[in-house]
Each structure stands twice: as structure tokens, then as C-alpha cells.
Image (cartoon, rainbow, N blue to C red):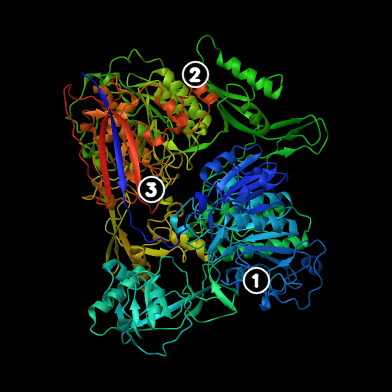
């Protein structure tokens, strides 16, 4: 077949017209603000920031441009507590400055945002609590915010003595600003006055240390914000002064909407130097919680990051429709009363003549006609309509809330409703000739579920250091009353004329000063404690919070809810509510005898199994520290010629530890397919090892997790499809929990001997036998490759299992269970046993590549994204691709965390999302009143048309609190009350407890946000004397909307290289029937005694082997195609998916849904030539030394390779990270290879949005 290639250049021009709230004009000479951060403590800012080190010379000496005067360019110098400056620089000047000796970082100025009673009583810190009055008056709290209102009663100095002697600050608050012995200092960094004109700073300062909070504590105010904007240079200046002024702690209720590198974050930089000087910094976690996981921007470990939670009071409001037709409850802090008068009700859409429908529905500014709105209640689809409604003269507003259970101070009678209740109002309005309503004044109710983390509160995981949990702790941040500026509007409407001394606000801005106040309280009893000691005290004594009620659990609230009284609690029940496996790494210091040996002794509960590695520690001197972790040393490719890897690895360890023997430290050598080893090392040894010649990277072992028939027919790969006899020559490697060799799916009946290329072995352990189908097995984590969990057998049979007729799960999904390539061979590599570790995964890659497999399927991954050089799968897959072996990996099951949740991001891996197919399992429950409700489960049981008594978890418990009983927590249900009944539990996890307690059935809430049918059951239960129900056996229905990407499937964009789209493709991953282990429970309840040969499971773990099977199918027709060519064929022939039906669109499904039959004839492929992967590493910044080691020869990066863009890597999808809200032009360069007909012509067909213009151009790149 003739093969040729040509260069395809794609030019995309997009013109976007957006209304932007803040516009910044160009700075003279195209100079931008930035900061310079220099290591010896000289920091510079462009509004670029430069960090330097100790103060040296004059800041003018550091300017990288020649001018007679730099006064117009130097904005700020940081010289009191650390070193640096802020200046106006061009991009070129900033780049030049970054290369100066001792400069740590240069970065552009960023805009930070403010993150905006009974709360102290709720926390237990009432006015009678024990205090240390003398020490309290010596504590100084620094507040970086919008300034302060010095005349507020909260800052009166009545009864205060003189300022502490340690105070070195000043009162530089500007004209008409006076400090006192309470408010002992003030500085204005953002304007000419420290006076608070917004109210935010006064509110946070009084929360932390206002009078009658931490009574005698002093306050120093640093105004670094004006409006809602706080600039990097002002924040750094605030830190520079506050540390030098002698404050004890700093409260910072501001932050970015997204996290940035620590060396570019002024709060992280300032807090670092504060911590070094003994000053604790507390920062609000952020208000981006509705964006999902990884939204927390306060991520530095030396900062105490604070989430926001509710208190036990809640402000609600009510609206009465018509003449009492319906009363609906919503949220707002509404101080107005309509005096029991029904007011005409109008809809925003009907009272505009100047706006389109979308803007009119939302009541955008200038949309409302004042004549039609005045003295009426207006309906607006979004909360922002409150400003337009007020300005147009409306008497009231009804809208729907974007953030649940959050009340805003409003400038008129207003209420926010749930979407369901808001639709009722719309329905009433549209069906009534003269609709009217009355909005009542707000009232306060008790919230018995508090504390619950607010939905707006930002959540983990930590985007930069996943192993540091953020936020650290939770505190009250919803509906907080505190002092306010009488110059500011109390509501979000700036034209609101009311003025108040105290106001109610919500936000992590409000929770942060609560923790600052508690930290100051602790400081009064322990004045010499370090910042980390205080932080530890707050976190380790926090109240445990209820994980099921808080989306994200620990990622939402950190260590728990702040507990000022530090009462010892019983956490064992909380910890043991779910099975878990945890690894902790600790450093111990010898303070005993100089030459000593310590043996680990373990005392624990019977339910816990604890191991200590190593069991014995030996020390030679006092204060010697030891901390052993498993580290991976990656040395790149194997060198050419005579090389004994194991000997080299032992010699390296010998040079590190100087022990007589290193056998106890070397865990594994990688020496068959690439070069490296795993060993137990101290942190210091790992650091030293990373400096050895030939070492690419040294990184700690990480924990990877498993990403847990009709599917092949749904894909069009039926049993009569065209196949190639070479299928039996294809070897599929499966990295998983092992395999059950006796399964019919792995029988070798009719198979000939293994392919001659096979160089592997059957090392599956005792009583494990391979055959001509299952030709090899290796075990790394236990003593047997037998699958005791079921996951590995399921994925292996999905990819390449035999045709097994009449397979089913208790009659469900009955048919022929088969893999994508039934005649292919399987090699099983057991790398998981509950969890999967880096060292075992790398060992499997080392073996599988050398064993001669054709492709590898790995249904496992991390919850977090790692750099390629520290990701075991990315490292192994790189060497596999270089040897012609395609690696297919599951995208992950973290889709509910939102975007950037995909962890499989390397371009040489085929990453697979999970989607539905046209078969769906549903279930029904019939209530005693005759009502039938439909839900979801795979229920093989039948109650034989018998109505069974129904009880609620709350009513069937005598040992648990109300919350735990509702959820049916472990050991909560009384077996006598539950046995032979149907139990109602608020959470799916209750299935374990219900089963163990002897219940006949369970009804639970599928989604806590959509609980209409579940509420119907609870309503029936509460209104019936002897409630009964019958749960029917599940049934199968056709899903016409399939394929749809599953909500659990992880989504892009790619966190490491945004210009490479991930995941790559989607395949069936929901309700998949495949082989299973007969020794594993078929359900999530481990005590389930049933055993099956085939089971139904969902996850990207199930979609991954589908794509592996298709890849193997393509390989049978094109045995000499490269991994990238096969990958391209699968991606370019994929079925397009419906973007509006799939949240995230291409970020959810990649190139589309797998199309097996079309994939064998793609026409053109985007192939990679030898060295392309290395050149990709060059363009993303890998250094020459690492490149040589990875490639294993004298390969070096081409000249100007760092100027090559990642988006020009020859990848089947075209993705670019572009600036938001601005027109842009993007060029892509691609080389396509003709694998179709020798003489052929291809026409580019473009389907796009009207706002995007796409052109293609042909260039020449030589023949292949």
C-alpha cells in the first residue's frame, strides 16, 4: 500500500463580543504591573514580582532597562520583612529580570477578591469562658482587608491600657483617621486612607477581635483592597509591614478564584515569611465551591485555610401567592414589610421593550420599563436582577437561588426560591389574569443540621500539593452579624440608601476571622507556641463533621469544625464507619541515648490492622532524624551494551546509606524494559539520590485506585463481523487485580500454542495454571495472581474473553458474554489488591513490555494528576509506546468533582471515558396506598407480591444520634425492629447496615438534591399508621438517549498540558456484564454470601477494556501499525456525540464514541515518527540531561524546541488554551498519513459554530 503524508495547517479565528465588568487600559510603554521575588530575600514586582533574599543594594540597581529615572516605574519596595519590589515592566524586561542572579521569581500582578451574633456562642466561646486577661491584651491581630471604621463601638478602647511594648507599628491611616489603645495601628496601601468604605474590613476585624469577642486583643488594620479588588503589590506591602510591626497573627479574607504556584502567590509568599518570623497567617479558602473540587485557592501548607459552614440560626422568608393560594418559603435577609398588602406581580420578560428575551428574563440592567414595574413585585430568573428591580422602582422581587440555603441582605422586599418553587410562581403568574403576591418580612429559625459546609465554600483536592489537605478547618461563615461601615450600602445594590453599624454577610471571608479569633484565644494561654503548634491544636481538636451531609467530606471541611473549648472527643466510631486503608509517613527524632535501637510496638483495636515499616530503627547520635518512605528512582531507558541493572542499583543505594547491606531497602529493580528501582529511603536520601548523575526523577510511591452482553452489539462489533485469522497472534496485557483462570471466558479450548513472540512466563503462584488462552501471569502485590475481587477478571474478559453463551447475572443481561477479540491471548499482571502502588505498576510495565505483549489495558489511576516524570503509568506507557506497545487507561471516576478531574493525561496514553448503552436497569416500589415509584438498582430478589412493613432508620435505632440514624450508619439499626422489614435510609451507604441487621429490603435516596420520590415515601410513612411496601425485581428497558457520558466519568481539560485534549474517547462503561471471581461478593456489601461467574459493574474501568478490545481488533488487520496510528484510527472514526446532552462536551467524551468497524479503515492517520514523544518532552521544558537518560542514547532536544507549542504535537484532536473573552487566532500543524487507497483525494469538511472561522491549508513535509 502506498503511504504518503502532507502537512495540515489549521487556522482558527474567533470573534467574541462580551461585556466585561472591569477593563484595564494599557500602561505607558506597554509596561505591565509585575512582581520580582528573589531568594536571598529581595522580592521584585511587574506588578511583575521578584523575590530576592536579604536586603542588598538599591532596588533601582535591579531594573533591567536603561533610563535616567526609574521613579515612574518603581511602585513598591518590600524591605522590612522580606526583599522584593513591584514595578511597571514590559514582558521583555520581566523576562530579562527573571534571569538576574538571586531572583527567585518574577510574576505579573494578579487581582485578588474579597471572599465574602450568635456564631461565637454556637462555637462554645461564650462571654463566661475562661480567659487569660493579661496575656490577651498583649496579642495583636493584623487584618489585611478593605480597611476599618475606627469610630465603631467594636473598636472602642474604653478600659484598655497602653499598647504592648513589642508593637513597632504606626497609625498611618490618613487624614481624619485616629487610632487608639484597641485599634493600635493602621496603614493604607491601596489608597490615601485606611478608612473602610466597603464594610468588609470592619466586619472581619470585629469578628476576629472586636470588643466582647476576644475582649482585650489589639487590632492593626492594613488596607490592601478597594472595592472587591486587592492587588498583589498591595498585599505583599501589607505583609511586609505587618510582620515588621510585631503582630502575632494575620487574618486575610481574600484570595484568587483559581490557585497559582506558591512562588507567584503574594499571600503564600508573605505567609511564608510570616511563619518564619513566628506569625500565623489565616486565609479564607475561597467562595468557588459551586465550581466543584480543586476550587480551593489557599493551598500553602504554612497557611491555615478556612472553609465556611452554617450556624444553628437560619434566615428564611415567605411569599404568599394570590389570596392564600400557596405560601412558599425561601431565603433572604429582608427587613421590609408590605403590611399584608397583595402587590401586582409581573415577569421581567413582560415589562421590557429594549432587551432580548434572555436578558429580559434575567432582568439585566436597563431592561426593565420603570412605568410597568413601579410599585409591583417583579419576577427575575437570576438574583442579579435585584439591582435593576430596585432601580426601576419595584416594591419587591422574586427570584431563584444559585446558592442553596444562603440569605442575602436585599434593598427591597425580595426572596430567593428553589427552582421548583420558582416554577410554581411562574405557573401561577401565567395562569392568573391579575396575579398578586405578598413577600413577608424575614424570620429566624433554628437549623438543627448545623454545622454544614456552605455550598459556596471552596473545596479540595489541593491542585498543587495533593498530599496536603485543604481547606484545613471549617468555621461559621453563613449569615454572620458583625460591625460595618456606615459609609457603605448594606446590600449588594450600591444605590441602597440605608446605612447601618452592623450587617449580616456570608462568605469564607466571615469564617476566616472566626478561626483567627480562636487562634488569638489559644495564643493567650500559650504565647510561645509556634504558628504550626497553634494550627495543629486547632485542627486536632476540631469537631468531627458528618461526611454524607457535606459534599466532598474532608475536601470540604478539612479536619472538622473549629472547637475553641478543645474538648476531647470520641472519633473511633467516626473513623470506623467505613472500611479504609491509610498510609502515614512520619519523621522521628532520637532524643534518648545516642547509640540506640527502637522496636515498633503496636496496641490497637481488634477492628484495625496496623503495620509499621520498618519495624526497627537504629540511631548513631542524638537529634538524628529518620523517616523511611518508598521512593521510585527513574533512570530512563536501559543503556546499550553490557549493563547489570541490579548491581548498579545496589551500588547507588550503598553510596546513599553506607549500610553493610542494602537488601532490606531495595524493593524492586526495573531492568527489562527501562531502568530504575524502588527502595525504602529517608527524605534526605531521596533528595541526595535525585542529584546523582543519570537520575531522571525520584518520587514517592503513590496509591492508584481501580476505576470501577450487549455492549459489543451496541458498538456494532457483533459475532458475525469481519475478523482476521491473525487475531490469535495478538496478546493483550491486563494490569489489574489478577484473573480467575478457571473461568469459561479464559478457557483455551480450540486454541493453538502461544505466539512465538511471547517471552513471558506463568508465575501466578501456587495452584494457578495458565493455558493457551491465558498464556501468562505475574503477581507483584500478593503471593497469587488469582483474582479475589472480581475486577481483573471482569476487565480481562471484556477486552479479550471467549464467547460464552447463556451468561447472565441472575437472568439479567442474558446472552453471549464476549470480549472484543475472543481469539486473542491474555497475559495477567496482578498489580492491585484493593489498592495499586507505583512500584508494582512500574514492575508490571517492565515485565509486560519485555514479555512481548501487543497492548496493555490498565483500568486504574489516581484521584490526582501528577507530572509525567512522577506518574508510574505515564512513565511505563512512554517506554511501551517507544517499543510499539499501545497503553489504554481508564480516565477515572471523579467526574462529579467537575472539570480537570481526568488523571490520565499523557499524550502517548489512550485515555477512555465511560458512557451508557441502550440497555438500562430500573426498579419499582409499590407503596401501600397504591402509588408506584421508579428508581434504579440491579435487584435480583422478589418479595413474591407481599407487602412488607416499612420503618425509618430514625425509628429503628436507640444507640445513635438523629443524623446517624437517618443515614443508617454502622451499628445504628436495632435488629429486632428491622428484621423482615423494608428500611428507609437517607443514604445509599445504609445498604450495608440494613443487610447486616436482617432487613428484607431498602429504600434510599439516589440524589440528595433531587429527592421528590424519596420524599413521597417518607410522607407516606409519616401519614400512615402501618405503612407497607413491595420492592419489585429489577427489569430491563431500552435507553434511546444512549450513548451519554456517565456523570462519574472524569473530565478535562488536561491539567498538565491543556493543549492535549483528555479523555481521548468514550466507550460503554455503565451496567457491563462480564466474567467475575467466584470468591468475591457480587455487591458492595462484603458480607453478601452470593457467588457468581458473571457480574454487572459500572465505571471507566469497564470502558477502558472495551477500547483495548477494539485496539486489538484493529491490530489484527494492521499488525505493523504504530500505537499512535491505532490510536488515531480509533479517535478519527469515532461517532460524534451530542454536546448539549453531555456536560463538558469534548472535555467529557474526547473525540467521540468508539466505532470498532469503521476504525479498521480510517483513510488517514495522525502518526508519530520515532523521536516525536521525546520532542514533545523538549517542548514542555524537560532538560537535556533528562532527555538523554529517558531516550537512553545521545538524543538531545532540537534547537528552538522550547518554542514549539504542545498543540503542534501530531495529535488526532486539536485543542488550544485561549484567553477568555477576547478574539483569538490559533494555528495547528498536523501531518496525516494515507493508509487508505494508494491514489486518493481527501476533502476537508468543516462543521463549526457560527462564531468560529476555520481554514485548512496544505503544506509539504516529505514522504513517509
- Residue positioned 58% across, 44% down in the render: 106
Q: Quadrant of residue 1066?
A: top left
Q: Secondary structure at mark 2?
A: loop
- Judge left or right: residue 517 versus residue 421: right
Is 1088 drawn above or below residue 151 in the view shown? above
CB atoms of marks 2 and 1 within 8 Å: no
Image mark for residue 99: none
Q: Residues within 10 Å of mark 3 (few under 14, many from 20)?
A: some
Mark 3 or mark 2, which is nearer the start of the sequence? 3
**Image-based side of 1239 in relation to 1056, left or right:** left
The image position of residue 599, as x and y in percent, is 73, 34
The residue lying furthest to the top in this view is: 642
Coordinates of residue 252 in the picture (x, y in percent):
62, 60
Of 674 and 626, which appears nearest the observer?
674
- Which residue lies under the disc numbered 3? 1048
Bin the neighbour count of mark 1 within 10 Å (Cα to Cα): few under 14, some 14-19, many 20 and up.
many
Asked if residue 581 can be seen in this view, the reply is no
Q: Provide the residue designation for mark 2.
A: 1192
Question: In this orientation, which residue lies closer to the viewer: 731 or 638?
Answer: 638
Q: Secondary structure at mark 1?
A: helix
* Residue 545 visible to an observer of this rendering: yes
Q: Neighbour class for label 2 at 10 Å: few (<14), some, many (≥20)?
A: some
Give the labeled residue for mark 1. Answer: 206
Asked which secondary structure carries label 3, the reply is loop
Note whether 660 is above or below 356 in the view shown.
Answer: above
Query: Which label's residue is closer to the chain start, 3 or 1?
Result: 1
Amino acid at each position: 500500500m502506498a503511504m504518503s503524508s502532507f502537512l495540515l495547517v489549521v487556522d482558527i479565528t474567533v470573534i467574541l463580543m462580551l461585556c466585561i465588568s472591569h477593563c484595564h487600559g494599557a500602561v505607558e510603554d506597554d509596561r505591565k504591573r509585575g512582581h520580582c521575588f528573589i531568594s536571598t530575600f529581595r522580592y521584585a514586582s511587574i506588578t511583575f514580582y521578584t523575590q530576592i533574599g536579604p536586603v542588598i543594594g538599591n532596588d533601582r540597581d535591579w531594573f533591567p532597562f536603561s533610563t535616567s529615572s526609574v521613579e515612574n516605574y518603581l511602585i513598591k519596595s518590600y524591605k522590612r520583612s522580606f526583599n522584593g519590589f513591584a514595578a511597571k515592566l514590559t514582558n521583555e524586561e520581566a523576562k530579562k529580570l527573571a534571569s538576574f542572579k538571586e531572583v527567585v521569581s518574577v510574576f505579573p500582578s494578579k487581582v485578588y477578591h474579597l471572599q465574602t451574633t450568635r456564631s461565637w456562642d454556637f462555637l462554645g466561646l461564650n462571654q463566661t469562658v475562661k480567659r487569660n486577661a493579661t496575656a490577651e491584651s498583649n496579642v495583636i491581630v493584623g487584618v489585611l482587608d478593605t480597611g476599618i471604621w475606627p469610630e465603631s463601638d467594636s473598636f472602642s478602647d474604653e478600659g484598655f491600657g497602653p499598647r504592648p511594648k513589642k508593637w513597632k507599628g504606626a497609625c498611618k491611616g490618613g487624614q481624619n483617621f485616629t487610632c487608639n489603645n484597641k485599634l493600635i495601628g493602621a496603614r493604607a496601601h491601596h489608597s490615601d486612607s485606611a478608612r473602610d468604605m466597603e464594610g468588609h474590613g470592619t466586619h472581619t476585624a470585629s469578628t476576629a477581635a472586636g470588643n466582647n469577642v476576644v475582649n482585650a486583643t489589639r487590632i492593626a488594620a492594613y488596607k490592601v483592597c478597594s472595592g472587591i479588588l486587592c492587588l498583589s503589590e498591595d498585599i505583599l506591602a501589607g505583609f511586609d509591614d505587618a510582620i515588621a510591626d510585631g503582630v502575632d497573627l494575620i487574618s486575610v479574607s481574600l484570595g484568587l478564584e483559581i490557585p497559582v504556584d506558591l512562588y507567584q502567590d503574594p499571600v503564600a509568599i508573605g505567609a511564608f515569611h510570616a511563619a518564619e518570623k513566628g506569625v500565623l497567617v489565616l486565609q479564607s479558602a475561597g467562595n468557588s465551591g459551586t465550581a466543584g473540587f480543586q476550587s480551593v485557592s489557599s493551598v500553602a501548607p504554612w497557611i491555615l485555610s478556612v472553609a465556611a459552614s452554617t450556624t444553628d440560626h437560619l434566615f428564611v422568608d415567605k411569599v404568599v401567592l394570590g389570596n392564600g393560594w400557596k405560601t412558599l418559603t425561601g431565603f433572604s435577609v429582608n427587613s421590609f414589610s408590605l403590611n399584608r398588602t397583595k402587590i401586582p406581580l409581573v415577569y421581567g420578560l413582560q415589562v421590557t421593550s429594549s432587551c432580548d428575551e434572555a436578558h429580559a428574563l434575567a432582568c439585566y440592567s436597563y431592561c426593565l420599563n420603570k412605568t410597568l414595574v413601579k410599585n409591583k413585585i417583579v419576577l427575575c430568573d437570576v438574583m442579579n436582577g435585584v439591582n435593576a428591580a430596585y432601580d426601576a422602582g419595584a416594591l419587591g422581587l422574586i427570584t431563584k437561588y444559585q446558592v442553596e440555603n444562603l440569605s442575602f441582605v436585599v434593598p427591597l422586599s425580595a426572596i430567593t426560591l428553589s427552582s421548583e418553587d420558582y416554577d410554581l410562581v411562574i405557573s401561577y403568574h401565567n395562569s392568573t389574569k391579575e396575579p398578586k403576591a405578598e413577600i413577608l418580612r424575614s424570620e429566624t429559625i433554628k437549623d438543627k443540621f448545623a454545622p454544614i459546609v456552605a455550598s459556596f465554600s471552596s473545596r479540595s483536592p489541593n491542585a498543587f500539593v495533593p498530599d496536603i489537605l485543604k481547606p484545613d478547618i471549617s468555621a461559621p461563615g453563613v449569615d454572620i452579624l458583625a460591625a460595618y461601615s456606615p459609609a457603605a450600602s448594606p446590600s449588594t445594590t450600591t444605590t441602597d440608601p440605608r446605612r447601618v453599624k452592623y450587617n449580616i454577610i456570608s462568605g469564607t471571608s466571615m469564617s476566616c476571622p472566626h478561626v483567627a479569633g480562636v487562634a488569638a484565644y489559644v495564643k493567650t494561654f500559650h504565647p510561645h507556641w509556634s504558628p504550626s503548634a497553634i494550627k495543629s491544636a486547632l485542627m486536632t481538636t476540631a469537631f468531627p463533621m458528618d461526611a454524607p451531609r457535606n459534599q466532598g467530606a474532608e475536601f470540604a471541611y478539612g479536619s472538622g469544625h473549629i472547637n475553641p473549648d478543645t474538648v476531647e472527643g470520641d472519633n473511633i466510631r467516626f473513623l470506623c464507619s467505613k472500611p479504609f486503608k491509610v498510609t502515614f509517613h512520619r519523621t522521628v527524632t532520637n532524643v534518648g541515648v545516642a547509640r540506640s535501637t527502637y522496636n515498633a510496638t503496636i496496641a490497637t483495636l481488634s477492628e484495625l490492622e496496623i503495620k509499621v515499616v520498618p519495624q526497627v530503627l537504629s540511631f548513631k547520635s542524638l537529634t538524628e532524624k529518620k523517616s523511611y518512605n518508598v521512593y521510585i528512582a527513574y533512570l530512563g531507558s536501559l543503556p546499550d551494551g553490557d549493563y547489570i541493572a541490579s548491581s548498579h542499583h545496589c551500588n547507588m543505594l550503598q553510596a546513599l546509606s553506607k549500610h553493610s547491606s542494602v537488601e532490606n531497602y531495595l524493593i524492586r529493580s526495573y531492568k527489562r524494559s527501562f531502568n530504575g528501582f524502588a527502595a525504602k529511603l529517608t527524605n534526605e536520601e531521596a533528595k541526595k539520590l535525585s542529584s546523582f548523575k543519570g537520575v531522571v526523577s525520584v518520587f514517592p510511591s503513590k496509591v492508584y485506585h481501580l476505576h470501577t452482553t450487549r455492549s459489543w452489539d451496541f458498538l456494532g462489533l457483533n459475532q458475525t463481523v469481519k475478523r482476521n485469522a491473525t487475531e490469535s497472534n495478538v496478546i493483550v496485557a491486563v494490569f489489574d487485580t489478577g484473573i480467575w483462570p478457571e473461568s469459561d471466558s479464559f478457557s483455551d479450548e480450540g486454541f493453538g500454542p502461544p505466539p512465538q513472540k511471547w517471552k513471558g512466563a506463568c508465575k501466578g503462584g501456587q495452584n494457578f495454571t495458565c493455558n493457551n488462552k491465558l498464556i501468562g501471569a505475574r503477581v507483584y502485590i500478593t503471593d497469587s495472581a488469582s483474582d479475589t475481587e472480581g475486577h481483573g477478571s471482569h476487565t480481562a474478559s471484556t477486552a479479550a474473553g471467549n464467547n460464552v453463551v447463556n451468561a447472565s447475572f441472575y437472568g439479567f443481561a442474558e446472552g453471549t458474554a464476549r470480549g472484543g477479540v475472543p481469539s486473542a491471548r491474555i497475559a495477567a499482571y496482578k498489580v492491585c489488591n484493593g489498592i495499586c502502588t507505583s512500584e508494582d505498576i512500574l514492575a508490571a510495565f517492565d515485565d509486560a513490555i519485555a514479555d512481548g505483549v501487543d497492548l496493555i489495558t490498565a483500568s486504574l489511576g489516581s484521584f490526582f494528576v501528577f507530572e509525567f516524570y512522577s506518574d508510574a503509568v505515564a512513565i511505563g506507557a512512554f517506554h511501551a509506546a517507544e517499543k510499539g506497545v499501545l497503553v489504554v487507561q481508564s480516565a477515572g471516576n471523579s467526574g462529579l468533582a467537575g472539570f480537570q478531574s481526568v488523571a490520565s493525561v499523557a499524550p502517548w496514553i489512550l485515555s477512555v471515558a465511560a458512557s451508557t448503552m441502550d440497555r438500562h436497569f430500573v426498579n419499582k416500589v409499590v407503596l401501600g396506598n397504591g402509588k408506584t415509584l421508579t428508581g434504579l438498582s440491579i435487584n435480583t430478589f422478589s418479595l413474591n407480591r407481599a407487602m412488607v412493613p416499612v420503618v425509618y432508620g430514625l425509628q429503628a435505632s436507640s444507640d445513635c444520634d438523629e443524623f446517624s440514624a437517618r443515614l443508617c450508619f454502622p451499628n445504628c439499626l436495632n435488629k429486632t425492629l428491622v428484621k423482615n422489614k423494608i428500611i428507609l435510609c437517607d443514604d445509599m451507604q445504609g445498604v450495608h447496615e440494613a443487610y447486616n441487621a436482617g432487613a428484607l429490603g431498602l429504600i434510599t435516596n439516589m440524589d440528595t438534591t433531587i429527592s421528590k420520590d424519596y420524599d413521597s415515601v417518607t410522607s407516606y410513612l409519616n401519614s400512615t399508621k402501618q405503612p407497607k411496601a413491595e420492592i419489585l425485581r429489577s427489569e430491563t428497558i431500552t435507553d434511546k438517549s444512549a450513548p451519554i457520558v456517565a456523570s462519574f466519568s472524569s473530565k478535562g481539560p488536561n491539567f498538565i498540558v491543556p493543549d492535549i485534549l483528555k479523555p481521548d474517547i468514550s466507550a460503554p462503561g455503565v451496567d457491563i456484564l462480564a466474567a467475575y471471581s467466584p470468591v468475591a461478593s457480587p455487591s458492595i456489601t462484603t458480607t453478601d454470601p452470593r457467588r457468581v461467574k458473571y457480574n454487572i459493574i459500572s465505571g471507566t474501568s469497564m470502558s477502558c477494556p472495551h477500547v483495548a478490545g477494539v485496539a486489538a481488533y484493529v491490530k489484527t488487520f494492521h499488525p505493523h501499525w504504530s500505537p499512535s496510528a491505532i490510536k488515531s484510527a480509533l479517535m478519527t472514526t469515532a461517532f460524534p456525540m451530542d454536546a448539549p446532552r453531555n456536560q463538558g462536551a469534548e472535555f467529557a467524551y474526547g473525540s467521540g464514541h468508539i466505532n470498532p468497524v469503521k476504525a479498521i479503515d480510517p483513510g488517514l492517520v495522525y502518526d508519530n515518527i520515532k523521536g516525536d514523544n521525546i520532542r514533545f518532552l523538549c517542548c514542555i521544558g524537560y532538560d537535556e540531561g533528562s532527555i538523554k537518560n529517558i531516550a537512553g542514547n545521545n538524543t538531545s532536544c532540537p534547537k528552538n524546541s522550547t518554542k514549539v507549542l504542545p498543540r503542534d504535537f501530531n495529535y488526532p484532536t486539536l485543542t488550544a488554551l485561549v484567553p477568555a473573552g477576547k478574539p483569538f487566532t490559533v494555528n495547528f500543524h498536523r501531518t496525516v498519513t494515507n493508509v487508505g487507497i494508494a491514489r486518493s483525494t481527501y476533502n476537508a469538511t468543516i462543521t463549526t459554530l457560527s462564531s468560529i472561522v476555520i481554514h485548512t491549508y496544505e503544506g509539504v513535509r516529505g514522504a513517509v
